[in-house]
Image (tube, helix red, strand yellow):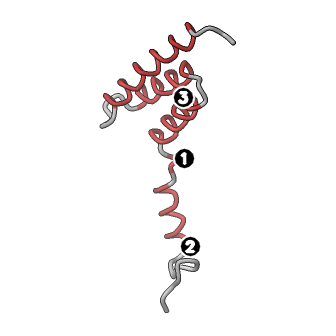
Amino acid sequence: MRGSPQRPNVRPLVCCAISLRTASWLNPRAAATRVAWQAALSGDYTDAVEHMQNYLELLPNATDAQSARDQIDLWQLKAKEHKLAPSK
């Protein structure tokens, strides 16, 4: 018997194993970069830099390490601009 998208015909253990393998919250790259991007989107560039640096400490040779370093440089510039901007 074939399963439907709502009720697939797979064993619960297989489904659980696949879910654990694909869960982004278990992936240090996804977790670290997600928090960094959320901080940047909220305007907290200093916190974003800190989280991205933590990511690079965890995975210094990641395929996107250079991109992460570039993003850190950009966020550091934005943090400086934000500090220099007059308060309203």
The image shows residue 64 at horizontal and vertical percentages of 33, 35
Image depth: mark 2 or mark 3 in front = 3
The CA span between labels 1 and 3 is 19 Å
**Mark 1 or mark 2, which has the lower sequence index?**
2
Helix, strand or loop status at disc 2: helix
The CA span between labels 2 and 3 is 39 Å
Helix, strand or loop status at disc 3: helix
Helix, strand or loop status at disc 1: helix
**Mark 2 or mark 3, which has the lower sequence index?**
2
- Dividing the image into 4 quarters, which one contains the C terminus? top right
The residue lying toward the viewer, choosing from 15 and 80, is: 80
**Mark 1 or mark 3, which has the lower sequence index?**
1
Residue occupying the point 55% across, 18% down: 46
Check disc 1 and give the amino acid type. Trp
In the drawing, what numbered circle is on residue 40?
Answer: 3
The residue lying toward the viewer, choosing from 13 and 71, is: 71
In the image, residue 36 sits, relative to residue 85, either above or below, namely below
In the drawing, what numbered circle is on residue 39?
Answer: none
Residue labelled with disc 2: 12
Residue 53 falls left or right of residue 63:
right
In the drawing, what numbered circle is on residue 25?
Answer: 1
Residue 88 falls left or right of residue 40:
right
Check disc 3 and give the amino acid type. Ala
The residue lying toward the viewer, choosing from 38 and 1, is: 38
The image shows residue 43 at horizontal and vertical percentages of 59, 25
- Circles 2 and 3: CB distance less than 8 Å? no
